[in-house]
Amino acid sequence: MALRMVVETAKQRDSRVRLDHATDRLDQPRALVDWRVSDSDRPGLDRLRRTLARLLRQSGHGEMIDDWNSHENGWPPSMDGGRHDMGNNRMHDDPTRGVVDADARVDGLENLHVAGSSVFPTGSNVDPKPTIVALTHRLAEHPRALTSHAADGP
């Protein structure tokens, strides 16, 4: 049996998504994901590995064979970003530390909002869909509030 370990990694300023010069079949620029991990992420993963190995051994359910250091980059194959691209439009009250405010409105633009995991201030190793749905529902209610206030007059 194989065990895949995924942990939340620390934010890396150099991790980013940018547009490539190459295009897709619709002639749109392809997205390039430059996701990075750092040595500061190792202690959490090491602690998880040691704990799982100990619990497996103590429970009598097996022994963990750990070969993650055999990989060319020194990280297990599961450390590939978790397939959840998050934080590209980070939500923060301070525009110098994020892209959108608490209402998912892009800083400096009155009528542009972003829905999705790109507004998450951090990522996670769990399914982001429930939070995305909640944020999207909240955002969908926001224009109604603006419209109803506008109809009331100044």
Image: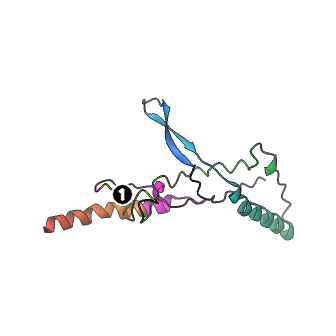
Quadrant the C terminus occupies? bottom left
Q: What secondary structure is marked by label 1?
A: loop
x, y percentage for residue 19? 48, 38
**Residue 6 in magenta stretch:** no
Q: Main secondary structure of the magenta part?
A: loop
**Residue 127 in magenta stretch:** yes
Q: Is residue 110 left or right of residue 40?
A: left
Q: Is residue 57 left or right of residue 116?
A: right
Q: Is residue 65 left or right of residue 123?
A: right
Q: Measuring 74% from the left and 50% from the top, which residue is drawn there?
A: 75
Give, as a single range, the part of the protein colored magenta.
110-134
Q: Measuring 84% from the left and 55% from the top, which residue is drawn there?
A: 65
Name the residue carrying label 1.
107
Up/down of 131 relative to 35, above or below: below
x, y percentage for residue 51? 78, 67
Q: Residue furthest left?
A: 153
Q: Residue furthest bottom?
A: 58
Q: Is residue 39 left or right of residue 10?
A: right
Label 1, residues with CA under 10 Å away: few <14, some 14-19, many ≥20: some
x, y percentage for residue 129? 50, 58
Q: Measuring 65% from the left and 52% from the top, which residue is drawn there?
A: 37
Numbered circles on residues, count: 1
Up/down of 102 relative to 107, above or below: below
Q: Report the coloring of the rendering.
A: rainbow
- Viewer-proximal residue, 5 or 81? 81
